[in-house]
Amino acid sequence: MSRMQDHRRLRVWQRATDNAVAIYDLTRSFPKHEQFGLSQQMRRSAVSIASNIAEGAGRESRADFRRFCFIALGSAHELECQLEIAFRLGFGSGHSERLTDTAELIRMLGSLVQALDTAG
């Protein structure tokens, strides 16, 4: 059996990876006392989105890929919530752009899941 596809070619994975890097940049400016709190949770959520897309793409079946895309979608929703909390707490700047990027990832993942449902 062969892998579903190379994750690096997926636009959604590329965007998720870019977003994860941007989240790391954003959280560097958070207060020191948040180093192991909200900052760490946001980083884990952001990395989880890209990682689950990659893992799913490397699986043997469309059903596995779809399942990992759902996990990535859950992480994207977590990140969206965490960004809102950080914004309300006044941590960092650039939340609007990160929220827009995360919402776009949610849309893209939803479309990918639908495509996996209808394909082959």
Image (tube, helix red, strand yellow):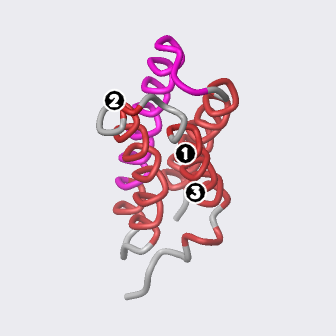
Is 32 a magenta residue? no
The N terminus, quarter of image: bottom left
Using a 10 Å C-alpha cutoff, classify the residue at mark 3 as few (fewer than 14 neighbours), some (14 to 19) or many (20 or more).
some
Name the N-terminal-most of marks 2 and 1: 2
Indicate the amino acid at tag 2: His
Magenta region: 67-92
Mark whose residue sits in front, 3 or 2: 2
Q: Secondary structure at mark 1?
A: helix
The x and y percentages for residue 50 are 49, 56
| Residue at numbered disc 2 | 33
Magenta residues, dominant SS class = helix
At horizontal 39% and vertical 45% (from top left) the residue drawn is 70
Q: Position of residue 39 (x, y in %)?
A: 40, 36
| Residue 119 coordinates in the image, percent (x, y) | 55, 59
Q: Looking at this view, is 40 or 16 the one in front?
A: 40
Callout 3 amino acid: Thr
**Sooner in the amino-acid sequence: mark 3 or mark 1:** 3
Mark seen at residue 17? 3
Which residue sits furthest front?
Answer: 32
Q: Residues within 10 Å of mark 1 (few under 14, many from 20)?
A: many
Could you give the CA–CA distance between mark 3 and mark 2, rounded to whole angstroms? 26 Å
* Separation of residues labelled 3 and 1 (CA atoms): 13 Å
Q: Which mark is residue 109?
A: 1
Point out residue 65 in the picture as x, y percentages from the top left corner: 41, 62
Q: Amino acid at mark 1?
A: Leu
Which is more toward the observer, 7 or 81? Answer: 81
